[in-house]
Image (cartoon, helix red, strand yellow):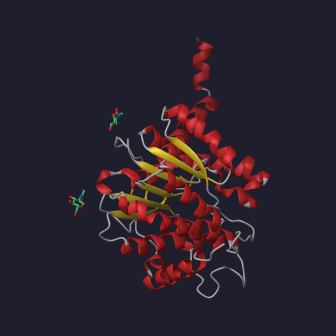
Amino acid sequence: MCIFIDCLLCPTVIWSAVIGIGVYFLKDYMQGGQFTKETNETGKVVIVTGANTGIGKETAKELARRGATVYMACRDMTRCEIARLEIVKETNNQNVFSRELDLSSLASIRKFVAGFKAEQQKLHVLINNAGVMRCPKTLTKDGFEIQLGVNHMGHFLLTNLLLDVLKKSAPSRIVVVSSLAHTRGAINVDDLNSEKSYDEGSAYSQSKLANVLFTRELAKRLEGTGVTVNALHPGVVDTELARNWKFFQTNFVKYFLKPMLWPLLKTPKSGAQTSIYAALDPDLVNVSGQYFSDCKPKEVAPAAKDEKVGKFLWAESEKWTSKSD
Ligand SMILES: *[C@@H]1O[C@H](CO)[C@@H](O)[C@H](O)[C@H]1NC(C)=O
Ligand SMILES: *[C@@H]1O[C@H](CO)[C@@H](O)[C@H](O)[C@H]1NC(C)=O
């Protein structure tokens, strides 16, 4: 007993305990806003892009838990099917489907939409979640710089092709996963496709700013239809999004920086909360063109309010994505 108390009071143990408890509360605090309202989504049809991992998978799982019919739209069908089986097992919801969608291919997007419409008459929620980050210079199958191509152009076409069924299913919602990185972004009007010069960080921020500009322009176009569209920042989340970022693959990051940052990162489950809030909160039924962070509204960057650039981006996106294969 003496030894026990002795040990309890020795500085190493005390400090370890204090630090441990501190890290625990810090991690807990950093998880941010959570969506806690219980809703029943039985009978609702939902599409989540990039649903096989990270925030997308957690979003799909939570919607399945609430009874929705969930379409998991993924590029890698093997991983999609593994995630789907896990979700079905955990939620006991059999209405979860994996379908192929490669957002870096206009042909694949058209094929996905045709397949979806052949199976479902309704779509209540579309969650544009998939994203790539800090890729080395790469072009999509249609010649678009890949971050703008996947994060914005692919979702632009997907959303527009699904608008008819969303309108038919109103009240319905579109959720666009953007990022705080949009505040660093600029739309390069003279070189939208980064042909003259390429910087992986700027191209990423541009694509995330494009997400917000798209959301605001689309909200105006959808006024009075019963279809809403909102963008959001999920938080700084520990996911695979940074898999293309060489910096994140160094040993320094893996064994030193990441453990240090761990208390500050959201889990994918916490990262999914704002998407779920935007998709489901009954109070948001008439809210459109907004931007959320931590399950509440947040101001966007001045560049995201530039309607002229928003219209330019919309016109370019229509031009780029109307190319037939
Ligand atoms: C949700 O609603 C459906 C019918 O609309 C019902 O069968 C089901 O039991 C409800 N689920 C929960 C958890 O209340
Ligand atoms: C949403 O708008 C409809 C139609 O204008 C209205 O009937 C309804 O009360 C509104 N709901 C909320 C939560 O604001």
Please indicate whether residue 159 sits to the left or right of residue 277 in the image: right
State the residue in front, 181 or 212: 212
* Residue 3 picture location, percent across and down: 63, 15
Considering every residue shown, the one lying at the far front of the view is 118
Check the image and report above or below for 126 versus 141.
above
Please indicate whether residue 282 sits to the left or right of residue 84 in the image: left
State the residue in front, 179 or 25: 179
* Residue 217 picture location, percent across and down: 42, 75
The N terminus, quarter of image? top right
Considering every residue shown, the one lying at the far right of the view is 251
Check the image and report above or below for 121 versus 138.
above
Query: Is residue 182 among what the camera can see?
Result: no
* Residue 121 picture location, percent across and down: 42, 53
Q: Dividing the picture into quarters, in which one does residue 223 lie?
A: bottom left
Please indicate whether residue 118 sits to the left or right of residue 249 in the image: left
Q: Quadrant of ligand 1?
A: top left
Rendered residue at 62%/66% (across/down): 150
Rendered residue at 38%/71% (across/down): 219
Q: Dividing the picture into quarters, in which one does residue 6 lie?
A: top right
* Residue 126 picture location, percent across and down: 46, 57
Rendered residue at 42%/60% (across/down): 165
The C terminus, quarter of image? bottom right
Considering every residue shown, the one lying at the far bottom of the view is 190
Query: Is residue 19 among what the camera can see?
Result: yes
Total number of numbered discs in the rendering: 0
